Amino acid sequence: MMYYTVIATLFLMGAASGQTSLRLSSCLTKEQNLEMICTFTPDPDPKLQKTCYYMTEDKLVGSTNSSSPPDSTFKNRANVSITANMCKLYLKGFSDDKPKNYTCFIQQTTTPMKISELLDKSKLQTCSGWCVMQHSGAALLLAFLTFPLLSEIL
């Protein structure tokens, strides 16, 4: 019984802190450009405006806030977009001179959440269909399994 209580407590703690969960994934396109996707749990209040931005070495790479211009190094090279639960960075001309730390910031409340990843171009995988599955795997799995499961119930 105590085992189940511990599991339930951990699950509830995870659910209570659900809005702070972030996951970052990255890959290289065929053109050798960087694609990063920061997945987050959206705040339940639909009225809250979501803002997303990426930084590296204290320089703004790109932002969904048009009043925050990127550093001149990244001007006209970075594109940042946000959906319900994903913030995507597309960076043209991704440099391979040395590994750099990239940080994704998601702001839904007054305090932004962040997650970082050290990127080395030589170790990044090429973007593929599998990367898409990793980014939206739960939604695709649900879409593929819904009909067979419903047909068994009915």
Image (cartoon, rainbow, N blue to C red):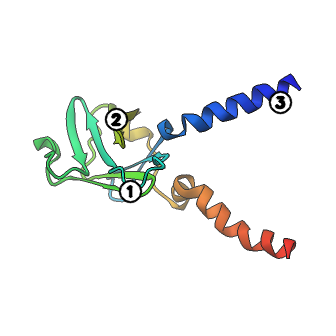
The amino acid marked with disc number 2 is Pro
Regarding residue 62, the answer to whether it shows in the image is yes
Residue lying at 77% horizontally and 25% vertically, measured from the top left: 6
Q: Secondary structure at mark 3?
A: helix
Among the two numbered marks 2 and 1 on one chain, the one whose residue lies closer to the N terminus:
1
CA distance for labels 3 and 1 = 45 Å
The residue singled out by tag 2 in the image is 112
The residue singled out by tag 3 in the image is 4
The residue singled out by tag 1 in the image is 29
Residue lying at 10% horizontally and 43% vertically, measured from the top left: 72
In the image, residue 102 above or below residue 154:
above
Q: Hey, which residue is sitting farthest top in the picture?
A: 2
Q: Secondary structure at mark 1?
A: loop
Residue 13 sits in which quadrant? top right
Mark 3 neighbour density, 10 Å: few (under 14) some (14–19) many (20 or more): few
The answer to which of 27 and 31 lies nearer the viewer is 27
CA distance for labels 3 and 2 = 34 Å
> In the shown orientation, is residue 55 left or right of residue 4?
left
Residue 10 sits in which quadrant? top right
